[in-house]
Amino acid sequence: MSRTPRQKPLFGPVDSSGLTVTDVVMQTKPQTKQQATFQRLVRQIEEQRAQVAEWRTYGERYNQRVGGELLPLFARMREKRIAMLHLFDMQFHQRNVVRGKHQRAKLRDIILSLADELLLEQHDEAIVALYDKYSDLSYEDQADLGKAISQDMVEHLFGVQLDDDDSGDSIEEIFAKAMRQQQEKARNKAESASRRRKSAKQTAAEERRAAEKKEISLSVREIYRKLASSLHPDRASTHLAVEEKTALMQRVNQAYDRGDLLELLNIQLEIEQIDADHLANLPAERIEHYIQVLRGQLAELKAELASLLAPYRSLVPYTLKIGPVHVDKAMDAEIARLEMDLRQADIDLEAYQDAKQLAAFIKNFEMGGELDELQMLDDLLGSFTAPPSRRRKR
């Protein structure tokens, strides 16, 4: 078995007692590309782990702020909007308050729009009744019709057939289910074609990759077996008590179940089963196996970090590298905006009890760019395939 050139310590002989694998490999100078790759992956994994730990810790604080600061403000804002809805309803029927067909039609649209927004947030039978009072089509019938139109469009677009009771209530849910169904059909078709067309060369390549994967797995399993043997309660040890062995073996089992090569190596270093010289001069074949495992670990950590960051991306959309400080600033700004909106809502609730001020509001009010179902579908497609399309107003 070939061996890599011996690595030279940067600062003389390395004392590995009390150090991690990362500490040890960072104090040695790589002599080959393999050794450099191994060191880089070890460093990147530690960096990713630190970020994952930071965001997990921050997630707890973020949830506390959401529950303790944001949600109460949203609840108060909803109460104000419901009060505004009832004020509009009352003023609609007051004599000499809302005058003329145009003004009444516009206030009717405002009431329906506000009721629809509130119902999208949370179902409320009292608001449904108020919606039905002003709409030619009941809220339930309107929802069924919108769902049927959306489902028909999506089925035609993707060439799939969705079950009526399994298509969801919103166009987003319908779209997601249709997309999954289409992807599954395409995947099955591709797999079927692949099985038919697979050549002897492709089969041999797959078998070779499977064999390499098995060898890599055996390398990790070998470390596990050495640790398990050394930490067995019946094995004599001059420096480890039975309780220490039990705790270490729990760590070994957990690391092995996760496929965490770095943690297994750390435990070997911790119990002096390996030392700095061993890590610095691994055989080339063994380093290559470790590199493949570490690449898999790094990919999993990156995916976990992306998942942890996903909820915050909408708060900090234009920052590529976000940190907790950016999210805190965004939350502070949202809290300030909600508090300002609450103050304005109180002012409006008082002002619109006056017929003249209500009339001025209705006159100047413009329905804000609601999207029809077709435009929503265009935007959904754009989010997957192209830049967002131009929005059309009703």
Image (cartoon, rainbow, N blue to C red):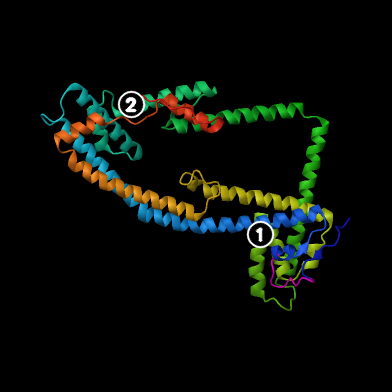
Q: Residues within 10 Å of mark 2 (few under 14, many from 20)?
A: some
Between discs 2 and 1, the one toward the N terminus: 2
Within 10 Å of the Cα at label 1, are there few (<14), some (14-19), or many (20+) other Cα atoms?
Answer: some
Q: Which residue, as the protein is rendered here, is positioned at the far left?
A: 95
Residue type indicated by callout 1: Ala
Q: Which residue is mark 1?
A: 255
Please state the horizontal and vertical placement of residue 376, each as a whole percent of the image. Answer: 44, 28
Q: How many marks?
A: 2
Q: Position of residue 225 (x, y in %)?
A: 75, 62
Can residue 177 be seen in this snapshot? no
Say if the magenta span includes residue 68. Answer: no
Q: Main secondary structure of the magenta part?
A: loop
Q: Quadrant of the C terminus?
A: top left
Magenta residue span: 12-20
Quarter that holds the N terminus: bottom right
Location of residue 108 by image quarter: top left
Whether residue 393 sits left or right of residue 110 in the image: it is: right
Residue under the point 36% across and 51% down: 335
Q: Which mark is residue 142?
A: 2
Q: Quadrant of residue 169?
A: top left
Q: Secondary structure at mark 1?
A: helix
- Tell me if residue 15 is in the magenta stretch: yes
Q: Residue furthest bottom?
A: 238
Question: Can you give x and y, in whole percent of width and height, for residue 292 in the image?
Answer: 74, 50
Amino acid bearing label 2: Gln
